Image: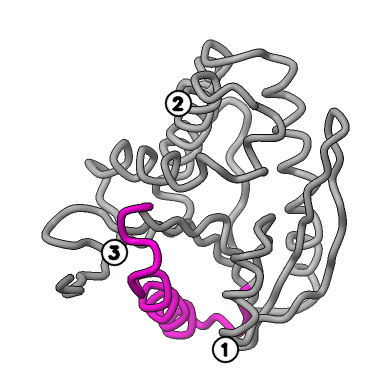
């Protein structure tokens, strides 16, 4: 496969395509499957959450993409130290309430509470120094996983953060496979915990790396 890739900022017109890519990439992750075991509901909820998150944060967070032949192959959301979470009103104005049409409201609220708890160590870590960026998400289209796209994309956004004054990157993962991948690239675990839901447990690892 020819791996000629273009790296750039995400365009507004690519938000929906990026959300569809991310939803595909997350489809078999415990991060979603433990909360939404039914595939049909899970696919609806994944896309609804990610699409509204991207729409609400576009222009506030940094969105970087990898393209192959003009189509998205990977997308990442990075939050700089100056990033501030959008207001509830901004989320409502960008259609967040429509997320609850995609699945069971209680499970969606439970998932949102889990996501906030899993991200808290990273947000707390950001407060410990200057120039610490938070990678809210990194997703590679399943069609390109295992081809080196993820490694090249990480090289790109690490360079982007350095070029914009960043000193460290921090994020969490709930995938042991991804954890091993990141550790091989020099990331170190600074927080490890288990999250339980309806009798199922999921690991959550927070990592950081000096750039």
Which is more toward the observer, 65 or 69? 69
Q: Position of residue 45 (x, y in %)?
A: 53, 25
Q: Position of residue 211 (x, y in %)?
A: 57, 88
Numbered mark located on residue 211 in the image:
1
Q: Quadrant of residue 196?
A: top right
User: Can you identify the residue that label 3 sits on?
Assistant: 66
Tell which circle, 1 or 2, labels the residue nearer the N-terminal end: 2
Which residue corresponds to the image point at 31% horizontal and 36% vertical from the top-left?
A: 16
User: Which of labels 1 and 2 is toward the front?
Assistant: 1
How many angstroms separate mark 1 from mark 3 (CA)? 21 Å
Tell which circle, 1 or 3, labels the residue nearer the N-terminal end: 3
Give above or below for 26 relative to 35: below
How many angstroms separate mark 2 from mark 3 (CA)? 25 Å
Seen in the image, is 194 located left or right of residue 33?
A: right
User: Which of labels 2 and 3 is toward the front?
Assistant: 3
How many angstroms separate mark 1 from mark 2 (CA)? 34 Å
């Amino acid at each position: 496969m020819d791996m000629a890739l273009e790296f750039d900022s995400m365009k507004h017109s690519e938000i929906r395509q990026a959300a569809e890519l991310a939803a595909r990439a997350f489809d078999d992750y415990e991060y979603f499957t433990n909360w939404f075991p039914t595939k049909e509901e899970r696919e609806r909820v994944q896309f609804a959450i990610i699409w509204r998150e991207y729409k609400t944060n576009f222009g506030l967070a940094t969105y970087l993409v990898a393209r192959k032949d003009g189509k998205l192959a990977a997308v990442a959301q990075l939050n700089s130290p100056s990033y501030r979470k959008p207001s509830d009103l901004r989320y409502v104005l960008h259609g967040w309430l429509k997320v609850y049409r995609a699945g069971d409201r209680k499970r969606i609220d439970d998932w949102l509470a889990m996501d906030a708890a899993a991200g808290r160590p990273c947000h707390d870590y950001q407060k410990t120094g200057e120039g610490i960026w938070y990678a809210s998400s990194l997703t590679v289209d399943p069609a390109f996983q295992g081809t080196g796209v993820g490694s090249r994309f990480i090289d790109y956004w690490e360079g982007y953060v350095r070029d914009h004054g960043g000193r460290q990157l921090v994020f969490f993962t709930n995938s042991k496979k991804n954890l091993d991948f990141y550790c091989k690239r020099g990331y170190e675990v600074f927080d490890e915990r288990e999250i339980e839901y309806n009798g199922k447990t999921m690991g959550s690892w927070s990592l950081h790396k000096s750039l």
